Amino acid sequence: MFSNSFIPDMRFGAGSFSETAAAAAVLGDIDRALVVMDSFLAASGLANRLIDDLRAHGITAALFADFAGEPKLPHLQAATRAAKGAQQVIGVGGGSAMDIAKITACCAASGQDPMFYALAANPLPKNPLRKILVPTTAGTGAEMSATSIFAGDEGKKLWIWGPETKADLVILDPALTVSLPPHLTAWCGMDAFIHAFEAATNRNTHAGVQLYAYEAMRLVAGALETAVKAPGNLDARGKVLLGSCYAGIAVDNCGTAIAHNISHALAGLAPIRHGLATALGFEATLPWLVAAPTAELDAAAKAIGLASAQELPGFTSDLMDRCDIRRALPVAFDAVSPDELANEMGAMENRPMRRATARDVVDGDLVRFAEVIMSLPKTA
Amino acid sequence: MFSNSFIPDMRFGAGSFSETAAAAAVLGDIDRALVVMDSFLAASGLANRLIDDLRAHGITAALFADFAGEPKLPHLQAATRAAKGAQQVIGVGGGSAMDIAKITACCAASGQDPMFYALAANPLPKNPLRKILVPTTAGTGAEMSATSIFAGDEGKKLWIWGPETKADLVILDPALTVSLPPHLTAWCGMDAFIHAFEAATNRNTHAGVQLYAYEAMRLVAGALETAVKAPGNLDARGKVLLGSCYAGIAVDNCGTAIAHNISHALAGLAPIRHGLATALGFEATLPWLVAAPTAELDAAAKAIGLASAQELPGFTSDLMDRCDIRRALPVAFDAVSPDELANEMGAMENRPMRRATARDVVDGDLVRFAEVIMSLPKTA
């Protein structure tokens, strides 16, 4: 038995961003929109281009670009104020822009504060503003998910979940991803690969999601090295972007596992890029995972052309080598001990990922994984 | 560049039908629903069971089961009257039940007659009733599509198209398909296989849909013989049902080709089951199609484990043999000439399927295909 959450309308192709305003005009009766865009993208002229296009379609648009890093409560409150009177929210950027757009579309419709919905405190409004999401990094798959993350008043990580936050239309334009630097391309791409792998092999997996997960693994594994080494290659960029989107579908339905447990635990201790943290956690745990191979682990290996699960660690390390991923932690982790990391991995909020892992994760495993991770070099 | 239409929430699994009422209760504020159900299913007690379940969830449900064969305008008008005051429509049955539910959900919301929307005469209402679709035949994939077919006042085939007609939730319960007789199982299953094949290989195909089409071909080709010969095998029934659903996604996005051109042309001349007509049209044209192999034809062949497109005709004939499909037309076709069929294949309304075919279809091809089809034995 499985249950799959709806998959939004998608457009894919180099140049498809130029259709955003026209798509907004046909998505529903509209004369006003809010554009949520990463500030460096807005500064590049992309915001003016979109706002001009919207105006040509009879839509007056406000811009919210005043955020950086992970979304914080004041960002969401400011975006909600800016959305006043709008019928649609158009999010353009990385995972933060996606999440702000998703939450704002709900809060602007109901007039409620984001905290009203945090941690499922209250049901989301049934008729949120319509949303168009345009991801410009290929990794999180946030454009396909029903989950949004933000930091509350004391910096505590909170989430809002519900199909009401999902996009009405997702536009995937590989041309928007060519400016992503090689190291971020590699980290984000590995995050997408690991989303797909964990969703396809964890204890919540099912046939209805493996379809997307396998295709995501094939697309990312086949194209990531080229996307890193030839940033302007639109074919490779498109494959990684589409793979990231399919991986987002997989995670939206089945969640993740131990690599993401480690990644979230690391992020709780010092600033680290999510994709890098996930890749390090994945490589550190994969040999242990495949030492107890399941049918799903073997099937995932076969989906990317390997003979069995035993070949996965070698394949993954080679992929990370080819993508020039340096195995190192930010210097801020100098102050972190393996015990602290193991503790964080065992914390309540990271338990679902631990429990979903295909192999039982006992406390001794957490300690061993933490030691492997913390033995990595710390670099600036 | 591609554009993919949204994919509804899905639940899959033997017994999942029993969750229908609970799903209706959480889909939105609701106290009243219309159940559209094939009359033989309603007579089996399935309607009472569902209506009792709905009542237990505080939902009063009316039943519309007064239809047979393809939906006609009076069916749609009667269903729309029966939906008065309802917030949801629940369709249970074959393609006709799906199409009646889809159209009724729009007409009941706006108060308009179905003819108001036929052939895209007017835009559909933006807030139709919510819809739960439960297919009980595995073939049409109508539960996933934005297209509905009905017969107008003079018997003319009309269509209504739009995302507003699509399901909010699709429930796939293999247990509901075990009573489908073996010959219908075989015909419907071939229809699903051919939907997937044509969507994956025609001139409108793209990578965003091949994902679903290939999986549909694998599922149906792998399980159809067992579903035909061991009707109670829920694993095989589930694979064919899921394959049919994925094929519906593929067709919803990319349409069909020459086999469906022939199938629609045959149906315009005398009564014939859609799946049988499609299978006969497919087998009659496949050797011609693969004589000019394209990259997409080879890729589709490889997706089901064949070496190249050249192996497709033999594979297909063997699959039809294993599923005991008799190559014969209904006796009513005794009165039809090959020229009449060729004419119908060339008619305006069947042109999109002709034009979408991977290989150019010239008039002489139509004549040759019509001769092959009409040379088949006619049986009672």
Image: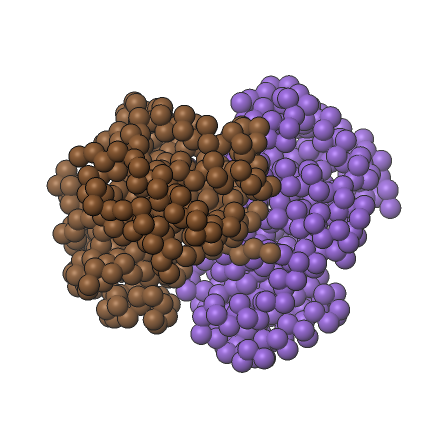
Chain colours: A purple, B brown
Residue displayed at 57% across by 28% down = B307
Point out residue A376 in the picture as x, y percentages from the top left corner.
Answer: 81, 33
Query: Up-down: is B154 above or below B67?
Result: below
Which image quarter: residue B108?
A: bottom left
Is residue B22 visible in the rendered structure shown here?
Answer: no
Q: Give the image location of residue B356, x and y in percent.
A: 48, 52
The quarter of the image holding the N terminus of chain B is bottom right
Location of residue A337 by image quarter? top right
Residue shown at 57%/36% (left/top)? B298
Q: Nearer the viewer, residue A101 or A225?
A: A225
Q: Quadrant of the C terminus of chain B?
A: top left
Residue B239 in the figure: left or right of residue A283:
left
Residue plotted at (19% across, 64% down): B153
Q: Nearer the viewer, residue A223 or A368?
A: A223
x then y, percent, for residue A281: 70, 34
Numbered marks: total: 0
Give residue A320's position: percent from left, percent from top.
76, 36
Residue A166 vertical placement versus B117 (above, below): above
- Residue in front for this viewpoint, A46 or B163: B163
Which of B365 and B103 lies nearest the eye of the viewer? B365
Q: Residue at x 29, y 30 (%)?
A: B326
